[in-house]
Amino acid sequence: MTDNRFETISIESKIREGVFHNVVKDLESGKAVSCSCKCWSKGKKPCVGMRTVGYESS
């Protein structure tokens, strides 16, 4: 079963060439909800990729 509320977007890192952030975007709000990068997975800090898509702190 797939959840159609979310979309995954690949955004290239501005710091490391060839490295991509897999940003998960909530289609209802249009805001990023998570990312595959260490900033998010380790420290829950929105990365450049998340801010590019749009991020709303809860």
Image (cartoon, rainbow, N blue to C red):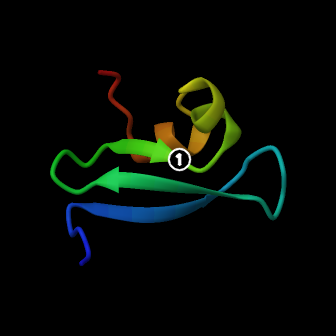
Which residue is found at the position 53% from the left and 27% from the top?
44
State which quarter of the image contains the N terminus.
Answer: bottom left
Which residue is found at the position 56% from the left and 25% from the top?
45
Lateral position of residue 17 relative to residue 34, left or right: right
The quarter of the displayed image where residue 10 is located: bottom right
Residue with the most extreme left position: 28
Type of amino acid at the residue the image marks with label 1: Cys
Compared with 4, 1 (above or below) is below
Compared with 22, 31 (above or below) is above
Give the secondary structure at mark 1.
Answer: strand
- For the residue pair 18 and 33, the one nearer the viewer reads as 33
Which residue is found at the position 26% from the left and 75% from the top?
2
Q: Label 1, on which residue? A: 35
The quarter of the displayed image where residue 29 is located: top left
State which quarter of the image contains the C terminus.
Answer: top left
Residue 28 is situated, as x and y percent measured from the top left of the image, at 15, 52
